[in-house]
Image (spheres, rainbow, N blue to C red):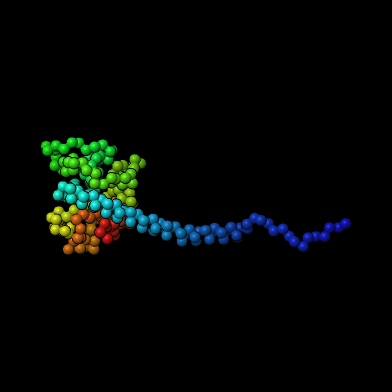
Amino acid sequence: MKRRPSIFRVRSTGFTLLELLAVIAVIGILAALIFPSVGAARKSANRTKTKVQFNQWATAIEGFRSEYGYYPVFHAENLVNPPAQTSTAGAVHLFHDLLAGRRRSGEALPAYSASSNVQLPEVQNRKRIVFHSFSASDLTDDTSPAPNLVRDAFDNVSIAVLVDRNLDGVINATDYPVYPAVVTREGGSIRPGPAQIPAPGVRAGVIFYAPDPNATAANPEFILSWK
């Protein structure tokens, strides 16, 4: 008996070239929409985290003042990581050691000696009080070109620290005739101007600032602890 031809045809399960190109185009459009927003969200989160770090460090410095009656004396450059700061964890790091009461390696500070340099951490924080416990995320890791330096959430180590030197409740040009320069990712130096620190100053005892990841010498932008 002769079999009748089926009125149904089995459709191929493969994709045509046109369909593949359409899918690729859609994926590309979605990626273009999603990735920038993800990157912007990550930057926003890191800015918030950096400001939290700054506030924690400022609180620790205020704790130091409450204990000893004066603000700690940092490096003359007024930077968290001054030029030529050694990466050796067991060596002196003035900012870290003053607030942590120990070396970056975890070793205790040497015993206080009246004959020691008055700026050394063991002399300023002679009780070796822990005002702030730095976590691993606060320090650059061993794979960094400069390990064991204090960093912000953007892995930036160029951070300025200023205190109210004359204790009038305001940080301004009276305390710092020239505000410290910080270094951008491209290697240029930038200083805050009147747009960041107005002439009357910032009403605070301790402030921090660092270059924004988008900052350039031609377009200085900052992450400011007080804004």
Residue 52: image quadrant is bottom left
Can residue 51 be seen? yes
> Seen from this angle, which residue lies furthest right?
1
Q: Position of residue 187 (x, y in %)?
A: 29, 51
Q: Position of residue 215 (x, y in %)?
A: 30, 57
84, above or below 208, in the image? above
Can residue 146 be seen? no
Number of numbered discs overlaid on the protein picture: 0
> Which residue is located at x 18 percent, y 50 percent?
66
Between 123 and 91, the residue placed more toward the observer is 123
Between 135 and 178, the residue placed more toward the observer is 135
> Which residue is located at x 21 percent, y 50 percent?
63
Horizontal side of residue 20 vs 116, given as left or right: right
Q: Position of residue 81 (x, y in %)?
A: 24, 46
115, above or below 187, in the image? above
- Quadrant housing the C terminus: bottom left
- Quadrant housing the N terminus: bottom right
Between 4 and 57, the residue placed more toward the observer is 57
Q: Position of residue 216 (x, y in %)?
A: 30, 56
Residue 194: image quadrant is bottom left
> Which residue is located at x 29 percent, y 57 percent?
223
> Which residue is located at x 60 percent, y 60 percent?
18
